[in-house]
Image: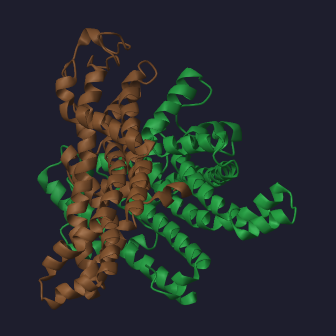
Chain colours: A brown, B green
Amino acid sequence: MASSSRSTQTAVFRSLNSKLLIGSGLLLLIAFVAIFGSWLSPYAYDQMSVLQRMKPPSSAHWFGTDELGRDVFSRTLTGAGMSIAIGFGATMLSLLVGVPLGLLSGYKRGGFDEFVMRCMDVLLSMPPIMLGLLFLAVSEPSAWKAILAVGCVYIPPTVRLTRSIALELANEEFIEAARARSESTWYILIKEILPNAWPTIAVEGSLRVTFAILLGAALSFLGMGAQPPSSEWGLMISQARPYIAQAPWIALAPGLAMCLTVIAINLFGDGLRAAIDPRSASRGH
Amino acid sequence: MALYVINRLLAVMVVLLVISMLVFGVTQIMPGDVASTIAGQFASPEVVDAIREKLGLNDPFYVQYWRWISSVVTGDFGQSLIMERPVSALISEAFMASASLAIVSFISVTLFGILLGVWAAVRRDKLADNLVSTFTYVGISIPEFFWGIVLIMFFANYLQILPSGGVASISASPGVWLSHIILPVITLTLTLIAHVSRLTRSSMLEALDSQYVRNARAKGLPERTVIFRHALPNALMPTITVLALDVGWLIGGIVVVEVVFSYPGIGRLLMFAIERHDLPLIQASILVIALIYCLANLVADLLYAVVNPKIRYGNGE
């Protein structure tokens, strides 16, 4: 017994790998900036100054200023909250709708399952960005609607994943026992199936956050998400486009910030997966 | 297999039918009104009403949908409201431009993705492998619209050796055509090359570890033959199915890339149509993109079924 617990311990220590450490360190830093961005930034994100237009990086303006004389460093910091909120908000939405639907679908099976899965097939048969555009084209765009649209885009994959786990678990003995005790369907789904399905859903969800951030930023870049004068990163890059020859820093700062965020989340997700299932890491997936 | 193909084809047709309803429904509840767009800003309400009556915009939803879809299946998407040209002509021009971009991109993804993956697998844990790993990590982390802008900054503004956007005709001057298409292609393929090479590397590692490769080596075959004749063909199976799926990704990415590089393809046409509320153009471009996406996924499914017999006979989940 003692030796087996020690080997588990070393396995845990080995799996606290560098990816997980660097990833979580970076994520903590980014989360801090996302939450306290407006207090950390030296200027207000929308403070304009005619005399300070398109100034290169200096000690007063670390990342320079944009075409309206606004401080790019401050805008990048405050933009973190918005860009990450779109990613996390959308992922949360897709989990809130997708997980119950998937659980019910996989547990009930039959006609309901068939109907839900065919609906998901239709939604999955359009490129994600096109689906997002279709939702957003209906009315005037805003950051809130971008969260809704990106969330809707990621509901189908969440439903599919949850359903496949629920399908497997539905035949387990402990579920049959619960049914024999004549527990209600929702009791079985939430108290019996969900706790067993949760780890897989959580790992998938953490990796999907990066897709959601990127899709949200792409929609804002296309003018269908956050609106000016917001400092959402995708929107900042889109607005910097006409000036990239004279003032490349306006586009570079939010772009690099976004890359850093995505890399941090990917490192964290990979590290987490490797810690849970060490074989997957050695295979190089 | 024949039954499976028919099944999948029917499914695609049903999905397309539902999408066409969805697209038509969404464009009906969009802000802006076709009649007032046609009549212009200063038209009296009576004129707008007359146009609305003439176009049948007061008919019930299903009547309008039926009228639209029955002309769509004959290839007639109506008249663009802004450009005052038939939508089908606009779409086919833009489609050809997008298709050439997509084809060059797809070839590059296949070629470089597989080559990089093989290289990394053969040099496992050496410098080349680490380089490719770093590249794939960065590749999947850079959003297309930012990567495209960085490329424009460097090649078009700083080095000034490539144009920052636009398009040229391939028949007039292949060199100029290539110079216009090269940056969009690099932008479009970075993520996918990263994806494909990652996958090829891991399936190649498995193949290099297998009994038949060890047998081939034991026979004293040269390493090059072992890699390209014995390991690679077996490692390529999962890559091929993923490549077909990546066509779908390519179509999604094309919208952003065309906007970044002002490339006159179907993605930019769609964004233009959405901005100007050109309803017939929005409907047509979304429908065409969805059609191609569905066909790409269908090909991926069929390829997968060829490779994996379990799918053909079991339930294809």
Give the left or right position of residue A24, taking residue A95 as reference.
Answer: right
Residue sitting at x 14%, y 49%: B44
Vertical arrangement, residue A3 with respect to residue B172, above or below: below
Residue B80 visible? The answer is no
Q: Quadrant of residue A198?
A: bottom left
Residue sitting at x 60%, y 62%: B239
Tell me residue A4's x, y (percent). 41, 63
Residue A259 visible? The answer is yes
Vertical arrangement, residue B60 with respect to residue A207, above or below: below
Viewer-proximal residue, A167 or B187?
A167
Give the left or right position of residue B266, taking residue A165 as reference.
Answer: right
Residue sitting at x 47%, y 50%: B254
Viewer-proximal residue, B69 or A235?
A235
Vertical arrangement, residue B232 with respect to residue B146, above or below: below
Tell me residue A191's x, y (percent). 17, 73
Vertical arrangement, residue B221 with respect to residue B159, above or below: below
Quadrant of the rendering where the N terminus of chain A is positioned: bottom left
Residue lying farthest to the front in this orientation = A2
Residue sitting at x 42%, y 52%: A10
Viewer-proximal residue, A180 or A61?
A180
Tell me residue B73's x, y (percent). 43, 73
Q: Quadrant of residue A222?
A: top left
Give the left or right position of residue B70, taking residue A74 as reference.
Answer: right
Tell me residue B139's x, y (percent). 51, 43
- Number of numbered tags placed on the structure image: 0
